[in-house]
Image: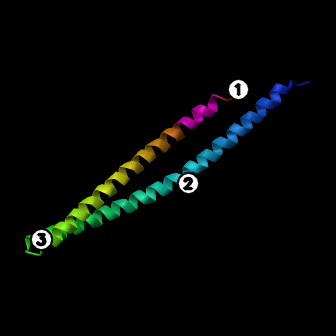
Amino acid sequence: MMPLTSFRLAFRKSVDDKRFRGLARALDGIQPEIDKESEQLRRARKRMMDCAAFSLEAMENGERSERMSAKLDTLAQELAANRARQLLLEHQISFLGRIRAGLPNFLGSHRG
């Protein structure tokens, strides 16, 4: 006759495996979302940089400097916000990588 503790341990291992697989699937779903947003930010940054270059050129060619100055200030703020978001996404990617790397170790510590 098997002691009841062996049934309880087998159940825990099964639960841990389910949780690990579920967490791995969740991580697999989050990474593409971050990658997509990051690519959108890169494209937006390029458009903003192009717009800033054209605005500077227009100012050099004598276009109203107050209007262009305000536009450049707005672009600078938008570029700063874009960069801040990009940095946050890089931190999220790093965090997800650490979680993914640690999951097998965590699961392995519960195997008997």
Q: Residues within 10 Å of mark 1 (few under 14, many from 20)?
A: few
Q: Which residues are magenta?
A: 102-109
| Residue 57 image label | none
Q: Earlier in the sequence, mark 2 or mark 1?
A: 2
Q: Earlier in the sequence, mark 3 or mark 2?
A: 2
Name which quarter of the figure residue 19 lies in.
top right
* C-alpha separation, residue under disc 3 versus residue under disc 2: 47 Å
Identified at 70% across, 26% down, the residue is 112
Identified at 57% across, 37% down, the residue is 103
Q: Residues within 10 Å of mark 3 (few under 14, many from 20)?
A: some
Q: Position of residue 56 (x, y in %)?
A: 14, 67
Identified at 63% across, 28% down, the residue is 109
Asked if the magenta segment contains residue 95, the reply would be no
Q: Is residue 38 left or right of residue 3?
A: left
Q: Residues within 10 Å of mark 2 (few under 14, many from 20)?
A: few
Q: Is residue 97 left or right of residue 52?
A: right
Q: What element does badge 1 sit on?
A: loop
Q: Earlier in the sequence, mark 1 or mark 3?
A: 3
Looking at the rendered structure, the kind of residue marked 1 is Gly
Disc 1 to disc 3: CB gap under 8 Å: no
Q: Position of residue 16 (x, y in %)?
A: 68, 37
Q: Which residue is mark 1?
A: 112
Q: Position of residue 93 (x, y in %)?
A: 45, 47
Q: Which residue is mark 3?
A: 65
Q: Which residue is mark 2?
A: 29
Question: Which mark is nearer the camera, 1 or 3?
Answer: 3
